[in-house]
Image: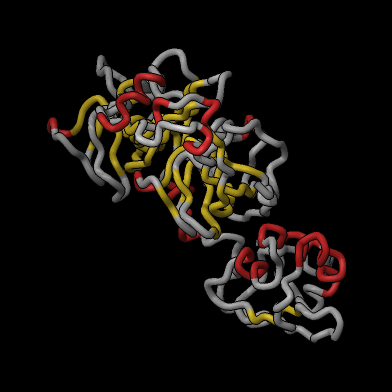
Amino acid sequence: MLKPIRTVATAALLTIATFAMAAGLRGDHPDTYVVKKGDTLWDIAGTFLQKPWLWPEIWQANPQVENPHLIYPGDVLSLAYLNRVTAQPGPRQLAPVTGVPLSQIEPFLKDLRVVDEIDSLPHVVGLEEDRLRSAKGQVVYIKGLPGAVAGQRYAVVRPTQRYARLDRTMCCDIFDAADLDNRGRRTIDFERHWTNVVVPDHGSEILGYELMQQATGTVTRGEVGGIEATTMVLDDSGREVRIGDRLIPVAAQPYDLQFFPHPPRQQFDYGRARVLAVADMLRTGGPRDVVALSVGARDGVDNGTVFSGWRVGSEVVDRMSTGSGWDRSEDSFGRANRVRLPDEFAGHLMVFRTFDKVSYALVMEGIRPIQVGHELKHPDAPY
């Protein structure tokens, strides 16, 4: 951590004067606010700004606040600018508040990641005593680590989802989030049969494979003496390990713990940025749920990018324009008799982990559930 804040006495004096017009000051804001345990910077900004994702501007406008992430429960923040209110720092006995609730996203920081391909990754080829499952303290045998030496550590991961995109020039892209078995092959899902047909294994762009960490292990012996597999001992109490699970090197905290919300750096073509999936294999999510997005680092998305999620407007048949056909099915009408309805705002999301073509975001707040297929727009988009 950086050195603690000495005072927050003027934490909003410059802010309100400078950013009231830009950020949209709420008319019912209090003169002061006492930071509470469990607060986030997003929540605090939401008490007096109409755009909570602009909270970095509040503290960046105050040079005495060297790190906006070092604001603690008990700190009294001044929100008055006409009658200056003296604010006091609180005790430093509890952890500082964060931009987002880290407890909600920790599993996605530690246990999940997205890679471009999985076929070249080393894999578990056998288990101690020919078991079907292995756990902490047991031995697993790895194929694909010919140069491994004793002491090297690896994470055992399992493919869970495959994200794909099919370009369509006539309309919008088709996105697919297919469940995978432990071999990394798609499972049969008859409800999604036609999507899987449209998005084949070849001919579409693979956005990435989601991997879930099962356990970690330490190599005890390489491929020596005619042995064609590397020996590794599982050394944590994670999930069970099976034949077919993949391996990746253990990385030292390859993710951010601090986030500065900001709008996307570019405008995406309609239909290009969508919600791919909701955590826990759900189709809808609300505040503090995690979603996967169809854009990533190659699209200019980075940690802290804020989107607004929108339900794509339906195309309905204007039966009044047909003069007849009230008993006909909607499928029998052409484009000339259809009306495109407006998109409907659902809520705001903030990216907290970015991969090349996919990113994870946390639903921050909203007025209706975020769903798979929702369009992603600038957080200030009016429609």
Q: Residue at x 38, y 45 (%)?
A: 283
Q: Residue at x 63, y 43 (%)?
A: 377
Where residue 260 sits: x, y (%)? Answer: 68, 54
One can see residue 275 in this view: no
Q: Is residue 21 above or below residue 86?
A: above
Instruction: Name the residue nearer the viewer: 190 or 341.
Output: 341
Where residue 269 sits: x, y (%)? Answer: 65, 31
Instruction: Name the residue nearer the viewer: 78 or 257.
Output: 78
Colour treatment of the image: secondary structure
Q: Is residue 85 above or below residue 117?
A: below
Quadrant including the N terminus:
bottom right
Name the residue at the front extreme.
323
Instruction: Name the residue nearer the viewer: 122 or 379.
Output: 379
One can see residue 305 in this view: yes
Instruction: Name the residue nearer the viewer: 30 or 102.
Output: 30
Q: Residue at x 53, y 20 (%)?
A: 167
Indicate the quadrant where residue 212 lies.
top left
Where residue 255 sits: x, y (%)? Answer: 56, 46
Taking the image as shown, residue 112 lies to the left or right of residue 127, namely right
Where residue 79 sits: x, y (%)? Answer: 76, 78
How many numbered discs, if any?
0
Indicate the quadrant where residue 120 lies.
top left
Q: Is residue 45 above or below residue 370?
A: below
Taking the image as shown, residue 304 lies to the left or right of residue 231, namely right
Taking the image as shown, residue 322 lies to the left or right of residue 197, namely right
Indicate the quadrant where residue 245 lies.
top left
Q: Is residue 254 above or below residue 34?
A: above
Q: Residue at x 46, y 56 (%)?
A: 286
